[in-house]
């Protein structure tokens, strides 16, 4: 982890960034600025897609 981290909102040097969403933008902030946004929770679960099976009937010609 880089040792020269700065809050992306106020510029204060920080040792442990807190990731928050502010107006839809993900920012690494200090503790004070983190209160201005919503906590960001990374969705680290693997992206699984559900498979839906459908059965097609043969077409009927008239």
Image (spheres, grey):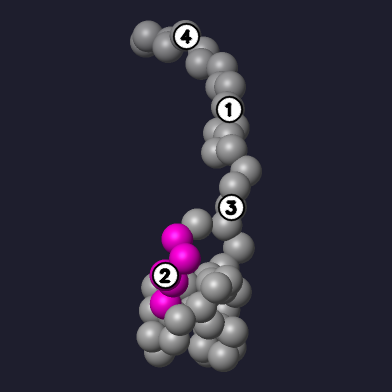
Residue 5 in magenta stretch? yes
Q: Which portion, as a residue range, is magenta?
A: 2-6
Residue position for label 2: 4
Q: Which residue is mark 1?
A: 52
Question: In which quadrant of the rendered view does residue 2 lie?
Answer: bottom left
Note whether 10 is above or below 13 in the view shown: below
Which of marks 2 and 1 precedes in the sequence?
2
Q: Can residue 21 be seen in this snapshot?
A: no
Of the two numbered discs 4 and 1 on the same chain, state the one appearing first in sequence. 1
60 or 17: which is nearer to us?
17
Q: In the rendered structure, which disc, 4 or 2, sits on the residue that comes first in sequence? A: 2
**The residue tagged with tag 2: helix, strand or loop?**
loop
Residue topped by disc 4:
58
Dots 4, 2 in contact, CB < 8 A: no
Task: Answer whether residue 24 is magenta in the image.
Answer: no
Is disc 3 surrounded by few (<14), some (14 to 19) or many (20+) residues within 10 Å?
few
Question: Distance of mark 3 from mark 1, alpha carbons?
Answer: 23 Å
Return the mark for residue 39: none
Residue under numbered circle 3: 43
């Amino acid at each position: 982890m880089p040792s020269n981290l700065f809050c992306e909102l106020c510029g204060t040097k920080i040792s442990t960034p807190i990731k928050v969403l502010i107006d839809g933008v993900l920012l690494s902030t200090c503790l004070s600025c983190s209160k201005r946004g919503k906590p960001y929770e990374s969705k680290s679960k693997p992206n699984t897609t559900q498979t839906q099976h459908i059965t097609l009937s043969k077409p009927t010609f008239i």
